[in-house]
Image (cartoon, grey):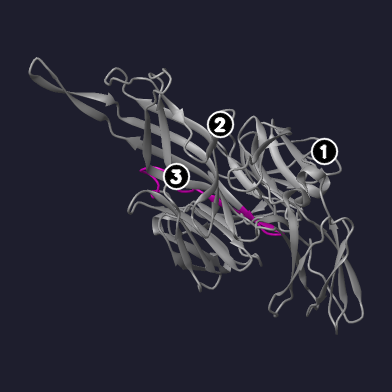
Amino acid sequence: MGSWLGACSNNGGVHVEIELPTDALSPITGGLSRLDLVAEAPGKLPQRATRDLPSPIGNATIGFGDLDLGPGVTVTLLGFSATGRLVGFGRASTPIDITAGSAVDVPIRLRRPFAYVAGGASLLACDTTVEPGDAFVDTIAAAAAPQAVATTPDGAGVIAIGGGHLQLLSTDNHMPSGAPASSVLPGANQIAVSPDSRWAVVVHSGAGVTAGVSIIDLVAAARASVTPAFVPLGSPGGVAVSTDTAWVLVDPSVPGPDACTQQSALIPVTLASGTAGAPISLAGAARDLALSADGKTILVAEPCQNALVAVTGGGASQVRLIAMPNPTQVAVSGTRVWGLGSDSAPTEHLVLVSVNADGSASSRLDLAATQELANSDDLTEDGQTAEVRLDADAIEAYSMSVLPDGGNVVLLVHGTYHADAVPRDITVGGVTYREDIVPALDMETYEYQLVDVKTGVAAERMRTSCNIDWEHGVALLDRWSCASAQGQVTSATNFIASQATVLYGAH
């Protein structure tokens, strides 16, 4: 594609060169019809300019007019369809210094904000830009058996750990970047990347696994096979990464009756040396963490405290940022902090909150309660069906990414569901007795969701795993299987999704 120009009258100008991926992945094929350019300079209000695009776009050059720019400006592009869907996003890799009389060329990768899901036989790419009801899932065969996945903040790459190897994919075509293979220790289940796209930190945990984190120099790994630096740590549960430090959550809260028995801690690990610092004890059990944009504040989801907590000063200050029910996930997008928890009133459902980093302008959204569907396999004649809708007994999100425009969130959700037996009265020879037509059913599921933050409704649902159980031989209908609810698709294979990430998203 051609270039777009944002200029200012007294200072210099910025010339944005847009790089697009191959046709199938391009925002243009998603219906790109409008571009917004956002320029943010320290101490100034964001400047925004909007331009409609010609059709066909071709090698157009479009002027965004006068913008009040200056040193340290950050440039972001948002691409929208005619219906207002976000179909493309890009941002400059680093802040730009613009001085009077100068013109700065800024390359920006404009990409669809795909959601990538690990845990199955291949990496899944979920297109968050399609219209509701359209197909949204594709497989990336080049990333086989991924255990964990992350994207680089510069928008250039997707990082997957699979088969004991680091896999680097290009966002241009979802193919290997050509980097030599690098081996990674077993038990990888999470990846986090530093804001400058220099470092990847991998969490290792699980039965029979040497617990700890691996530190990978991505710049070196792009040129040659590397051996990650491994830092042994007991019971790591999550990681957030700044440009020089990885903050590792250890002894995390675990789902179930023992959720609040641990006292979690934060351990700083210096990226360049792999040196672990002294632990910072938290007030109780924690499930997730994220870093503020300046890397000075650690945001922690503490479900047993029913709060998101801001940790500063090397742990000297631990302040409740916002109260919320049972938070299990936290993310930071600019100056906005997002938390995800769950509530049982009136029924089990997820709760999404967002708040400014200073605790102001908080909002709460109760997401729509989800149901699962069971189908009777005993009724096989045409026109015969029996279905049971199961409500959630417990539901929690164990992965969350906020789309770059803040309009949607991507979740991985674990739920347990129950439906009571359905009886009927039967009279034989004047004697009435009760017989169950349908047995009590229990179901456990794992699911990907794309949720609209305005409505709380899932625009995309993909169930990756479903197990159903009942007492056999006690009811008339005695064979049951998982069925897809309305708007829900089922993955081709049954697997537990381990991690999800959104390109350019907040994690």
Residue lying farthest to the left in this orientation: 430
* Picture residue at 85% right of the left edge, 38% below the top: 178
Query: Is residue 94 rendered to the left or right of residue 104?
Result: left
Residue 419, given in percent of the width and then of the height, sits at 32, 35
Q: For mark 1, what is the residue?
A: 225
Give the magenta-colored segment's residue range: 240-261
Q: Is residue 500 visible?
A: yes
Crowding near pointer 3: few (<14 within 10 Å), some, many (20+)?
some
* Picture residue at 79% right of the left edge, 64% below the top: 94
> Of tags 1 and 2, which is closer to the observer?
2
CA gap, disc 1 and disc 3? 36 Å
Q: Is residue 64 above or below residue 505?
A: below
Crowding near pointer 1: few (<14 within 10 Å), some, many (20+)?
some
Q: Is residue 123 above or below residue 439?
A: below
Q: Amino acid at mark 1?
A: Ser
Q: Amino acid at mark 2?
A: Phe
User: Most prominent secondary structure in the magenta stretch?
Assistant: loop
